[in-house]
Structure formats: C-alpha cells, structure tokens
Amino acid sequence: MSTTSQPSAETDAREQRTELERRADLLIEAARAAGAQEVEVCARSGRSLSAKVEKGDLGQVQSDEGATCGLRVILDGRLGFASTNQASDEALRTMAAEAVAIARLSPPDEANVLSQPTTVDPGAFMGPRVDPALAAIGVREVVEGAQGLADAALARDPRLSVDQASFSAVSGGTLLVSTTGVRQFDFDAALSLSLMALAVDGDETGGFDYRGVAVRDKAALPAELDRIAGEVALSCIGNLGARAGKTYQGRVLFAPGALQSAILQPLLGSASAIAVQRGRSALSDRLGDCVAPGLSIVDDPTDRRSIGARAFDREGLAARRFDLLEEGVLNGFIHNGYSAAVDGVASTGHAQGGARGVPGLGFHALVIGPSAPEGGFEGAADEAALMRALGEGLYIQRFSGSVDAASGDFSGTAKSARWIAGGEVQHAVQEVMISGNAFDVLSRGLEVSSQLERLGGSSQICWGLGDGISVTAD
C-alpha cells in the first residue's frame, strides 16, 4: 500500500489544531451564553491503525479517525460535563446547553473550580519532535508489524505458540482551553506492540506470558520487537517442566511487573491527595517519614523516551518532575485541580484522563529504583545479583490476585515463577499462592536493582527482593 498520500506530522498537527480550536471556542461561547461561569474544553483528534495476528492467522485490522470534545462547566460551584464526537455547530451548541443543564441539577461543591494556568516549558512539547516516519505508516506496515512480531517469537523455539501479536500506530493532537486562560495544544505519535504466547512440548503446556511496549521513534522498533519476542519466548519455554513449590514465610524476589502489581500499587495509590482527603490512604500522616527504606520514586514527564511524557496534564497545567520518595522518605502527595482546591494548594500537574470524562488523578512517567541523584541510579545490582542475594526461595515474574489499595493487603497467584537455589534458577514452579502486606514489605526495606525495566513504554521499575511474605504451595 502506498503511503505517499499520508499527511506530514506537521501538516496533520496544524490542521487538527485549527479544527479543535474552532470547536472549543464555539463550545465556550455557547456554554457561557447558557449561564456557565467557568468553562473548560478538552478536545482530542487523531487516527489509529492496528492489526492482530491470532493463533497464526491475521485477525482484526482496524482503522479509526475522528475527534472528541469534552466540556466541563461550573455554575455556582455546580459541575456539569458532556462530550461529543459531532462536529456541527448545532451539535456543539446542543451539548453546551446539556452540560449547563446537568450543572444546574448537580450538588454544589466549592472545590469545583478551574485551575489557573501555569507556564509550560516550550521544550517539553512532543509535537516538534514527532518522528516524521510515524505519520507515513500505512495499513500494510501495521499488518507486517504484527506478523513480524509473531514470526520473531516463533523463530526462537519451535515449542512456542503465539496466542496473539498486535501492532498499532496512533497519532493525534490534544487541546486544552479554559476561561481561566489555559490554552495548550500538543501533538504526539507512537507505535505499540504486544505479544502473548505459551509453550507446548508434547502433552505439556506451559503457562502464558505477555509483554508490551510503545515507542515514539520508528528506528527503535526493530530492537524493541526483538526484545519483546525474546523475553516472551524465554519466559514461556522456562515455564515448561514446572514442579511443586514450597510453603514458607520469608523473602521473595519480584520482577518489575510483579513488584508493581503486588507491592507498589498500594503505595502509589496512597500518594493520591484524593485518597488522603477521603480517608483511603495509609500515608495520610506520613509526610517526611521514611516509608520505604532504600527506594526512590520519581514521576518524570520530561523524559521523552517514556510514552507517559507530556508537556501538560489533563487540565492544561505544566507537567513537571515530581520526587515522590527520596531514599524512602515521602515528600508529598500528587494533586489535580479539584484536590488542590480542597486543600487550598496548587495543583502538581497530575490531572489525568481524556476528552470523554472529567479529570482524574494519577502519575505520568514513573521511575522507581534504589536512588535518583540527578535523575540517575546508584549501584550496579541486576536481576542475577538479586537472585544471588536471595540464595534460595521464590522468584515471581507476574502476580495475579487482589490488592487492597487502602490497607496494602495482597493475596494471589505467582505466575511464571521460578525456584531459586544457590542463587540460580533451578526450575519453574507450579502456581503457588503468596500473601502479605505491601506497606509491611516496604517498611522492612526492599533490596532493589539499579537495572530497570520499562513496562508498557511508560513506567521504569526495578527488580525487588522483599521479606515477610507468605508462600503457600498445594
């Protein structure tokens, strides 16, 4: 398929901005005419191409293009919200009237206010640095990308069976405009790929494994495709020959994905100012305390290598580096406009979400490791070094179960697990149950690696060796 008809990234961004601003300005005018005192428009326009190879056959191929506008209005502290993908003036005016009508019926809340604009660093915008090659990607390349990922995995070992390989190209612009003076636009583009597979050897079928990643530079794609295929193949083949596990209580080694799911999730959730305000945070009275010895957590939306990188948040405010933990010490909580108004402070620029809903709250681009002086990490510990430090015990690559974000209690199944003895992998382990409390594990102090893994193209997370964990085998 020829790609010469595809617009350049620069042309695409300019055209999208012009149209989104037309809709946003009309919506603001209509909402104010209907009685709204404060108005915000979040608009998103873009296109996506995706393909999947499922069990050896080309499956779903999709192409989507369009724009959505979300309108948030405030009237006497009452909030109304509506969204539409319609472009006509009539449809936009109707939506504005509906949003104001919803606001009139909503309960008042003095924290329902729009944030004042902040200065956004011009160098943080993605648009000027979007890889031009991404704008030229067509259907054929997307299909070939999905098939190439499946083929790369299958070439690693004949026992591998690919359940699904997917490849997508997404590009689009985001506009934030408000009556408080916010007016920000940025354009971004990315490629994403994911792979799910298992290994079959005669009558034995090993457990599934999965990897996914996203990149902003097309030149980085071959290396990432090869890495994903290799990691999934290695894990799936390693799942064969699983033996019974052992019941004990003590130390467990977590791969980055498992560490995030079981241990870090409650910590990150408790760092939300909204969780604190609603009495759902275990960290509400721990500011300035060492809550996780040996661990540092940075949210760095300025790191362009991360798909979470951005110049501004869902409310159009500057997204800046935020040091959540330094050497285990809790420095603060993240805020969006609403939580900031409740506490009478400034937003930290952590509003999240899209055009189809009101702003949420969350991190952008986490970097989690042993320490973070000047954005780097001390030490040279890697996965193998932590295995040696464990000596003997369970190594978990994936965790599937329940985690109570407020209490930190977790319980679930260890997936793609390995038994370590003499500091080395001995064999795969049949599914065992693990349980414990994340805050207890963190307070004991994690032994963590300076080696990090990028999960899903956004978060970079270390390996972690934690203590006080119950392991139960059948």
Image (spheres, rainbow, N blue to C red):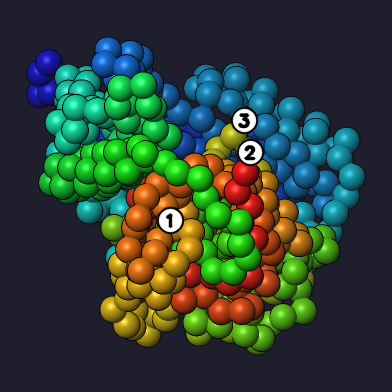
Q: Residue flagged by tag 2: what amino acid is it?
A: Gly
**Sequence-first disc among 2 and 1:** 2
Q: Considering depth in this image, is 310 or 8 the residue closer to the camera?
A: 310
Left or right side of 29 for 110: right
SS for tag 1?
A: strand
- The vertical placement of 327 against 193, above or below, is below
Left or right of 256 in this view: 94: right
Residue at 45% from the left image edge and 44% from the top image edge: 243
Residue 357: assigned label: 2
Residue in front for this viewpoint, 160 or 214: 160
Q: Quadrant of residue 405?
A: bottom right
Q: Give the label, 2 or 1, closer to the camera.
A: 1
Q: Can residue 343 be seen in this snapshot?
A: yes
Q: Amino acid at mark 3?
A: Ser
* Whether residue 145 is situated above or below residue 415 in the rendered picture: above
Q: Could you classify mark 3 by the number of other residues whose Cα lies within 10 Å: few (under 14), some (14-19), or many (20 or more)? A: many
User: Residue visible at 65% across and 87% down?
Assistant: 288
Q: Which residue is mark 3?
A: 83
Q: Which mark is residue 288?
A: none
